[in-house]
Image: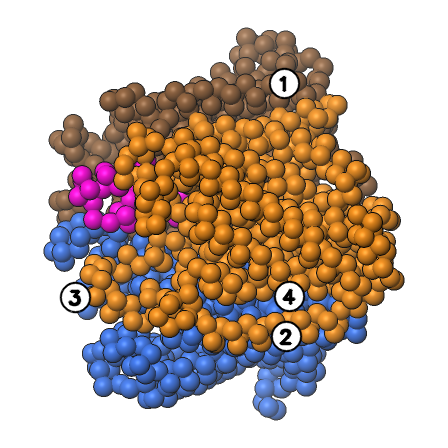
Chain colours: A brown, B blue, C orange
Amino acid sequence: MGCIQSFRQCCDRPKNTNVRISLPAVCFVWQIAMIILFGIFIRYNEESDAHWIEHKTSKNISSNIENDYYFRYPSFQDVHVMIFVGFGFLMTFLKRYSFGAVGFNFLIAGFGLQWALLMQGWFHSLDPMDGKIKIGVESMINADFCVASCLIAYGAVLGKVSPVQLMVMTLFGVTLYAVEEYIILSLIHARDAGGSMVIHTFGAYYGLSISWMLYRPNLDQSKHRIGSVYHSDVFAMIGTLFLWMFWPSFNSAISDHGDGQHRAAINTYLSLAATVLTALAISSLSQKTGKLDMVHIQNATLAGGVAVGTAAEFMLMPYGSLIVGFCCGIISTLGYIYITPFMEKYLKIHDTCGIHNLHAMPGVIGGIVGAITAAAASEDVYGKEGLMNTFDFTGEWKEMVPTRQGGHQAAGLCVALCFGIGGGIIVGCILRLPIWGDAPDNSCFDDEIYWETAWHHHLL
Amino acid sequence: MGCIQSFRQCCDRPKNTNVRISLPAVCFVWQIAMIILFGIFIRYNEESDAHWIEHKTSKNISSNIENDYYFRYPSFQDVHVMIFVGFGFLMTFLKRYSFGAVGFNFLIAGFGLQWALLMQGWFHSLDPMDGKIKIGVESMINADFCVASCLIAYGAVLGKVSPVQLMVMTLFGVTLYAVEEYIILSLIHARDAGGSMVIHTFGAYYGLSISWMLYRPNLDQSKHRIGSVYHSDVFAMIGTLFLWMFWPSFNSAISDHGDGQHRAAINTYLSLAATVLTALAISSLSQKTGKLDMVHIQNATLAGGVAVGTAAEFMLMPYGSLIVGFCCGIISTLGYIYITPFMEKYLKIHDTCGIHNLHAMPGVIGGIVGAITAAAASEDVYGKEGLMNTFDFTGEWKEMVPTRQGGHQAAGLCVALCFGIGGGIIVGCILRLPIWGDAPDNSCFDDEIYWETAWHHHLL
Amino acid sequence: MGCIQSFRQCCDRPKNTNVRISLPAVCFVWQIAMIILFGIFIRYNEESDAHWIEHKTSKNISSNIENDYYFRYPSFQDVHVMIFVGFGFLMTFLKRYSFGAVGFNFLIAGFGLQWALLMQGWFHSLDPMDGKIKIGVESMINADFCVASCLIAYGAVLGKVSPVQLMVMTLFGVTLYAVEEYIILSLIHARDAGGSMVIHTFGAYYGLSISWMLYRPNLDQSKHRIGSVYHSDVFAMIGTLFLWMFWPSFNSAISDHGDGQHRAAINTYLSLAATVLTALAISSLSQKTGKLDMVHIQNATLAGGVAVGTAAEFMLMPYGSLIVGFCCGIISTLGYIYITPFMEKYLKIHDTCGIHNLHAMPGVIGGIVGAITAAAASEDVYGKEGLMNTFDFTGEWKEMVPTRQGGHQAAGLCVALCFGIGGGIIVGCILRLPIWGDAPDNSCFDDEIYWETAWHHHLL
């Protein structure tokens, strides 16, 4: 800890927020690198290549509708909306940081998805025949998923970092994600359709650790800008609702064709509905006169979608989904009331959007629910083929049984936690270097630092 | 009437808007009840159960793409957006009630869809083998449809009721809906793909009757808050446009696979386009200098979607759809100009969002158009198989003919009207009890009653 | 030029913005004309007609899922969102013209799509058997595409024209579009899945030419209203993001079933991602302290989607898409910085939304990229059947080869340019007549001219 403290002090030099060299440089260099790497590695897969018509004949596929595109593209577009409008607008609640919220969200996602296609491609879809990565609609969904974890992390540091720091954070975040995803899904053979562990747990702890490393003791100089105005809260509801509505697509986007996608959508739909009621109830209980708090409505209502992520494709049962949503609405809202202030005061972790309550805790709960549901799976409930199909007990995992699968799920959760916390601390160290152009303590949460807003002060 | 008057007076005690006990209590009790009832009754249907893979083999289904999920899920997501963003944002137009609009809309819908799955399940999809309700993607769409009727009703009382009242209104609304839907669709065998009768007529008269029962003679104390500001009108356009754009999905979501869905989408698309022009024209005509009124653009442009609901899956013909839209744009806009003030002044029905113009009148027109179109159906136009298929003249309805079907459609419309008006009066009585925490007459249309808004007054 | 000048002067009479007669008259007359023409000409096609069930049997189609509806409806809905929310909200950035942006966008689109169904129908889907136009989901997408070109044109004249002028502009715009589309796609046999040439190049030059004809030398009297406020910029981001996210659906909506749609979506997804980074980089470079400009983020980030439109369905390769996006982000942003002011000052073309940078230049680039990619196509890359399939070398075009196809693509681009510029000049002349109710120079960009806004001045 002493070492960390002294490193912190060494980094605390006067701030220069001019990013005119660094931001364009990073954007250009990385984009050019992407082009070169894409040129070397990335090709269309057999379903998006012009040879599809021959492939179809050779594999005896009866119709174009069997192309994976038609199974997944609607879900992909819903996920895409969640990434750009959902996460982007959810963060617009701050009275003076709406441009930064939606604009930097755009930047992170635009860069992150390219890098994710490469990183995930190397681990998951490298064609051994020609050494190329073959991409299709599922790759785009996975890239969006990967980006989601970085955007969750952004929530913790919203308003306190520069766009250059965000690019660095995304570069490392995507890299770490691809590795932990490979370990969890491929090596450990855990299932995680909606990414409770892989996306939410990892992303949230990655962001919280970075926020801890970047702790600003004098942040109260910007305190008056931490808060919303009437219309910024309405804008944030756009983000909330698009996340809430499309979460069934998120959790079902890459699960099995047929019953897998169908069931994942139903479970998520139900879990989220239950969350709305308990989040509202706790919000009302927490105020002297029973008034509701927009922060809870905007965020805690989503916790059920996170927590049902892993188990969504399992036979969680409709009432099981409701129970998960019920609990998460309560826990998440209580988190906003008690845990976020506690973390800031005692743990020195400032969490702008409260991602600990929306992603970290529900993500861990989701991992545990997934482990329990997997361990409790039986041929009675799933059917013999259904069980094999749902848990992918094929190939080298032919001998797997549900109880052991439960253990593997739990192991997956631990890996996500370790990568999140460990990775976040290391990347946080890097981001403390006084070269990234972040704002001084008295100019946080202010769009004027990085945006042209000549008219700004006259109006707000 | 005298009896109603004295009941009204008895209920007019001083108001206490503290909902700290009642709101959380209702939320928790009802959510726990939902979990128990879901545990007893609700299971996955054969297309979302893990046994799907065996079911597929046994029924000789060639591909996963034949799962109903792929026929309906994109439409479901569009409907979902209409329910949460469409209805929610449409009501944000009031200058100080945007939180209440979008937040309580969220609450109603989150609770309503769970209760709807149960109520509709008992009537429509109870499996006689095991006494369970089997749900799938179509159940989710139907639950969203049912919730829509309650949200329409909310439009009439927007800003004048407490969240607890809304929960009670939704509980009864969903119950009534399930019964009238069963009578109209199953007993009477009327067709109503887009719900002109079942959803819009019922929902609108339910809401108007409640508003009549809850009439506040001194509402002019809150008059200065009935109106919009510039940006609240822009927010409302988000709601308008998402409703308008996705209405083709709404009307086609549960119609027959193949040509049924295809035709319903086309008819709705065309009807709505015509409505835009006539609504705008009448709006411009109604002002001395030809200026347009945002209220008309936000609402009357949608009337064509309501009115084409029943007949959308029939062979209404493209020009028929345009005619329906043409008329409804005119009628709905005239309604805003003449009928809404008339109803408030002489009938003592205050209708905050003008649902009489957007849902009630177009809904009734839709029912009539449906009856006429059905009665005029012929084998020439539909083909022999097409006629049977479109009107479902199978099983016990094998002997049905189009002319009689027209009569049944008209009967369905009457049932919807009776349930709406009758149910609304009874529920309105209940909601007059002075225990629900609604706002006094001088604090209506104000978010401050139910929302934490410390900064509010400084800014607006 | 002298002739044009004198025509201009003759038209410059005092302005009367009362549209109470003209706007309703135009709306009613045209809508009634639509009903009559639809009655005479438009019918359902075999996939949306009730005879589908018989058609299915006769054509040996195995399942309802083979109905084109299921291939294209999700993309249609995404395109629909782009037209109404995307274009509508993108233009809400002006501080006092949000109603006009989203409201007139609604009007243009609502009328345009009906007229487009007719015009495109006459050219493309007239059934020779009965002289009727047969419509289905693809017709709706094409109608939306056609409307897009008129909305692009609206961007150039935003705030300077009356709704009646917009209706006239749309009537002619749709007509010209249908003709140039017929020439480019059918006569010249150019391919243009995403409409870089047909939609964007044509639409942008059509709008710019009209804006040139309607040049207002004294527009600086309204200069103080050309600009945004904080929340109007956030509203505009809603438009930007929905355009950005759904662009892959736009470019793939009408391309070939199977690999064609799949590949078009991937290429667009990648191109747009690259554009974000370079647009941001140039934006930051252009300011002394590296601050970002919302105008660039809102607009230039979309250029990659325009430029990849023609080639999206070709084997452009993932890195090729990135390169296109990379270049367009740079060019488009530089356009906003240098070319727009230049055009206003020296060419007397005022371009409110900067469509020259977002649609014109990227559209031309897209046409060129398409020509090169087509000319470079080979059987190696596409496969024998894939090449025929992708470029539709069938029927009378059986003997076509890729190199010649490249020439045809280039010819198509020229046609789009000619129709845009020529048509715009002629229509611009018509719109100069002093009968359309447009605003005087000191009342441009002001919603008060055409909208009831009693409360307006108190609040902004």
Q: Does the segment drawn in magenta span residue B249?
A: no
The residue closer to the viewer here, C297 or A4, is C297
User: Magenta segment: does it hold A67?
Assistant: yes
Q: Which residue is mark 4?
A: B297
The amino acid pointed to by label 3 is Met
Q: Is residue C81 above or below residue C299?
A: below
Cα distance between the residues tagged 1 and 2:
58 Å
Q: Quadrant of the C terminus of chain A?
A: top right
Amino acid carrying label 1: it is Ser
Which residue corresponds to the image point at 83% horizontal and 60% vertical from the top-left?
C11
Task: Report the mark closest to the observer, 4 or 2.
Answer: 2
Q: Which tag is nearer the camera, tag 3 or tag 2? A: 2
Residue C385 visible, this orientation: yes
- On screen, residue A377 versus residue C331, left or right, reads left
Helix, strand or loop for the magenta stretch, by majority:
helix
Which residue is labeled 3 in the image?
B129
Is label 1 in contact with label 2 (beta carbons under 8 Å)?
Answer: no
**Residue receiving disc 2:** C28
Residue designated by label 1: A22
Q: Are marks 4 and 1 on the same chain?
A: no
Q: Hey, what amino acid is under mark 4?
A: Ile
Tell me where residue B361 appears, x and y as whole percent: 55, 79
